[in-house]
Structures are given as structure tokens and as C-alpha cells.
Image (cartoon, rainbow, N blue to C red):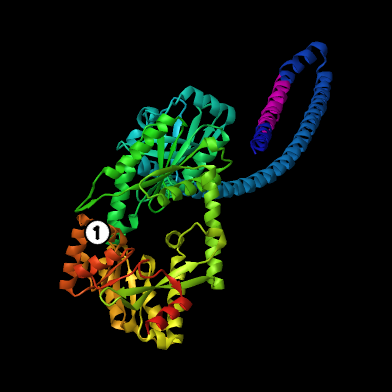
Amino acid sequence: MEKKLDHVHKKLLNHQEITHISKKEYNPWRITLVYTIIGVLWILFSDGILGMLVQDHQVYQEMQLYKGWFYVAMTSILFYYFASLNNNRVFQLNQKIQDKNEELLATSEELIAIDDELVEKVKSLDKMNLELQKQKKYFDLLYNNSNAAIMIWRTTGEVVDLNKHYYEVLGYDESFVGENWIEYTRTSIEDFDLSTFIDRLYKKKQLINYETRMRAKDGSVRDMIWNDVLMETKNEEPLIVSFGIDVTDEHKQQQKLIEMATKDPVTGLDNRVVFDTKIEALIEEQKPYTVYYINIDYFKDLNDIHGHDYGDLFLVALSKTLKFLELSHAYRWQGDGFLIIQETVDEEKIQKMLEYILNLSNRKWELVDVEYQMTLSVGVVTSLMSQKNVSEVLKQLDIALYKAKANGRGRYEFYSQELLEEVFFRAGLEKKINNALLENAFELYYQPIFNLRERTFNACEVLLRWQDTTHKDMNIGRLIEFAEQTGQILRIDRWVIEKAFLRISAEHEIFSNLNVSINISTQTFNSSKFIPYLVEMVDLYKINTKRISFEITEHSIIKNMTKAKEVMSQLKAIGFSVSLDDFGTRYSSLNYLSMFPFDVLKIDKSYIDDILDKDKGYIIVKQLLSLTEALGIVTVAEGIEHEAQSVLLHDMGCQFGQGYHFAKPMPYSELEKQIALKE
């Protein structure tokens, strides 16, 4: 466009120059002046010259005539010459003017085109200006309403501008412009070198997704992710535009998720996920370690009696004692289990750790208004057993802990190959018990209960027997204890009850005058399904419940006394009587006799063995018999092996007794014979 305008301007100047020349060259006064000069010179000098040349007057007159015609001819020729010359010049000038006019016409058209183009350009510029205004408005909207904190700054660190979100995140406003942002926002832990940063930015032109910690105006620290762009122009100082996203809350949430995934919510200890990772790393790196699996004995009692809030209080208290053990790390396993990893196999250090753990059992734990004392069982595994993975470690820990509990609790056991063999044995035994239940391989035996005064019996105790050749060395007591540990005791109790009820129903004549005592385990007694099951069996076999007594141990009632009273009341409502079996083997509290509606008290054999010495055992039994008589409770002495014991017990006031002195447990066929002999 500028070139076109320059071209038109030159054409106009050229036209003006031609017009000016034409006016100068074709002035009519020049011709007039020349003609006047010639005329004046002719008049002045022609007569004089003619007078000098012609003396004759007549000739002179004629010559004057010729002179006049000559003048006319000469002036005509001159006039023609000048007229012709002017005419040519005028023609040439007219031709030039015509050419210039045509050129001017073209120029005019060109100007019109340029004008039209200028109009279009102006419209385009107006449109572009409007678009730029819209873009500026849009940019301002994005800039100040962006979710990113935006800061524009010089390579020296001086702030040029910042947007609204920068203020919302970090608290710095317009007064921050002109300041060096590094001095204000960088935390002490951030090692930031400006020159290195600028060099990297010049090389890459932009830095993407790097994270820093920024100090806000109020002193808090924010986690930020930044993207920086270098803006360079030819004649101006380069600027840096930084876009920052605040990820502080996301980091906190992420940290919470990590803690949820790796921390136990109750104790705050690392959980199994962290434990597994640590063990796998130790195995892979072939580093020595010892793992302790700690379990709280009878922890369920604390939860059942006082509630889970108190259980959680104790778990927190115990975890604090384990958390800061020297050269070890504690983990919450599950329920009442904790794990400790100690990176050593040094026997002295292991023994020191075990002593510390077991000494915790001697402490009394104050849980708000409850005083709690417990014991801990510990399974121990060392890397000397060459585990291949964490699964093997856990398997060995389970075996060692199980052995510690089986041996009396409140102790520790190291894993060994012998323990593994024992586990295989127990697994085989558990399977055999299941098969025995399915195949009715168990058998009921009956031991008569004698009247010590009349020396006859009208009652018997139902006992379980198992004729298995592979477990001859296992007495029935150990079998029951094992079944209680595996949970199979519930099925065994049901098998005994159903078979006993079936026998009583089928042999109605014999059992119409024979009372039957049936032992039930703690698990069965505390089961919510026990009473409904009994009601179903009574209805199925149509038995006389007044002839049946259920024997329970002290351990069955100690866990939940309120529940125990409720179950006893339900048993008595159905018509059954209730016996307290093995009195004296556990807690031996006389309070039970007044607190619970027992019909029969069975004195344990451990007391009966000592009565002949008339020492402490004799005194205890004597006082116990006096108490039960006053309370109206029938007494049965267990384990009578000598006639002297029987006589003394009768003299002391004991009504009934059972033991090898009278009769051993026998199959039903033998019981029938004993009843026939009695009759």
C-alpha cells in the first residue's frame, strides 16, 4: 500500500511540473515584445538607411512603398514563423497534457482503487481491533479467573505481574510487584539457585511439572506444581511466565490414603502391608532378622466384659510400649496380634527382647476406671530357618504362636521343624475328627453315679469315647481340649446330645428311672444357638427333661455372668437341671454357688485325693459340703478310688459319688447288665 501511494505521489508532482513549464514557455507577451522591438527598430533605422541610399525623392517615395510592402512581408513571415513555432509548441504541449490527463485519469482510478482498498483495510483493522479487544477481555478473564496461580517476572526475580488466584493461594497482592519473589516465597528447605534455573530455562524454553514448596504471606507452606515459559522479544528484556497449581490438599489426601493403606487406624502402627514389604526386602537382601508374633491371651474377655472401647484403649497403650523398642519396628497385625521385626539373630538380643515382652504381663494397666492385667503369648521366627517369602514367615509364626498357647499361654516358643511336624499331626487329627463325626465313629460310654448311703445308682454320666488306633496315646481330655481349640467341639457336643437323646428315647423303660448327666463345652453353653437346638431335640425325641442334667465348668460362666444366668434360667425353664462340674480346677469361687441356680455341685478329684489326710483338702471339702447342704445343692464327689474315701465322704455329708472304686465308664451294653443286676 505504501509503494502504491508513493507512485501516485510522484505522478502528481510530475504533472504539476509540466503545467508549470507550459505556462512559462508559452507566455504571449514574449511574441508581442519581439514583434514590437522589430517594428520599433524597422521604423527607426529603415528610413535613415533608405535616405542614405536614395537621393531621388520620387524614387525615395517608391522605395517607401516597397519598404512598406517589405515590412509587411517580413513581419508576416516572422509572424508566421512565430505562430507556426507557437502552434507546434502548443500542439506538443497539448499532446503532453493529453497524455498527462490520461495518466492522471489512470492515477485517479488507481487512487479510487487505493481508496477502496483503504476502506477495506480500515474495516479489517476495525474488525481486528474488535477481535483483539475480545481476546484481551478473554485473556483478562482467563488470567484473573484461572485456577492456576500466574506470575510474570524478570530473570532477576523481580515480579512484573500476578493474577488473582496467586493472591488467593499465597496471599501476595499488587504490592508484591517489583519485589524479588525468591526472598519471600522460598522455604528454608528449598535449595534454589536462580542462575541455574534461568540457564535451564534458556536451554529448554520451558520447564514442565516440577514441584516446589512455597511459603505464603501468612507463613504457611503450600505444595505447588509449576510450569514456566520463557518469553523473548527482539528489543525487550525477556520475561518468565510461571503457572502454579496448589496441590497441598491433594498431598494431604494422598498422605491420608497412604496412612489408611499402611497404618493401623486404632494404634497408629504400621500394618501388615508394610510388614510384608519389609520382610520381603530383608529376605531379598539376605539380611538377618527375628520376628516376634505377640498375641494377647484372653483378650476377648476384656472386650466382652468391658466393651471394645476399653479393648482399644489397651491396644493403644500396648502399642506405645512396643513402638520405640531399640533396634526394632512394631506392626499391628490383626485383632489382638502384634508383630515386631528385629534385624538381628543375636541370641542375647533376642532373649532381652523376649524378657521385655513377657514382663509386660506383670504390669497392671489402668484403662480409665478399669484395671487390667493380661498375659502375652509369643511366637518367634528367625531368618536362620531360611524362609523363601513372607508367606513362609507368617506360616512359621502361626505355628510357633499356636505352640506357645497350647503350652499354657503367657510364654514364647521358637519355630522349629519339630513344631511343623506337630502341626501336620494336628491337621491330620482335625481331619480324623471330622470324618469320625460324619461316620459316627465316636461312641458313648456311661459311668454310674452312686448313692453313697445306699450303694446303688440311679444316675449316670454320659462320656465320649473314640476307638482310633492311630491316637491310642491321646486321652479323651486331650481330644476335647484339641476340639475346643479347633472349634469342632460345637459339632461334637451336638453329636453327644443327639445320640444321648436318641438312646434315652429308644430305651425308655431303662431311662425312665435313670438320670443322665451330659457334659457341654464352654463354646456350646455360650452359643446363641444352644437353647433353640435343645428345644428342637426335645420335641423330636419326646424325652423327659427332668431326668437330664447338663454339666458346665466354671470357665463357661466366668466370661459373661449375665449371659450365664440367662442360659441357666432357660435350661431350667425347659426342665433340665444344671450341674457345676470340676469345681476347684480353675477359679473355685464360692460366690458362684449363691449367684447361679445350680442343682448339683461336682467336687473335683483333686480335692477328693487329699481328704484322707484330713489336712487342707479335708477341711475345704468339709466346709464345701456344709455350704451346699445349707444352699440345698446336691453334691457329687468325682474320682473316688478307695472305699475309705467313699465312707469318709458319706460321713461328711456327701450324697453321691462316682469313680473307679464303683465303676469305670462302660458302653451301653455293660450298663444294661449293671441295671439288670441291680434289679
Q: Amino acid at mark 1?
A: Leu
Q: Which residues are magenta?
A: 16-40
State the residue at coordinates (55%, 30%). 233
Q: Position of residue 300 (x, y in %)?
A: 34, 58
| Residue 126: in magenta span | no
Q: Nearer the viewer, residue 21 or 425?
A: 425
Q: Quadrant of the C terminus?
A: bottom left
Helix, strand or loop for the magenta stretch, by majority: helix
**Callout 1 secondary element:** helix
Left or right side of 253 for 287: right
Q: Residues within 10 Å of mark 1 (few under 14, many from 20)?
A: some
| Residue 18: in magenta span | yes
Q: Position of residue 453 (x, y in %)?
A: 25, 75
Q: Position of residue 235 (x, y in %)?
A: 53, 26
Q: Nearer the viewer, residue 249 or 54?
A: 249
Q: Which residue is mark 1?
A: 612
State the residue at coordinates (82%, 12%). 53
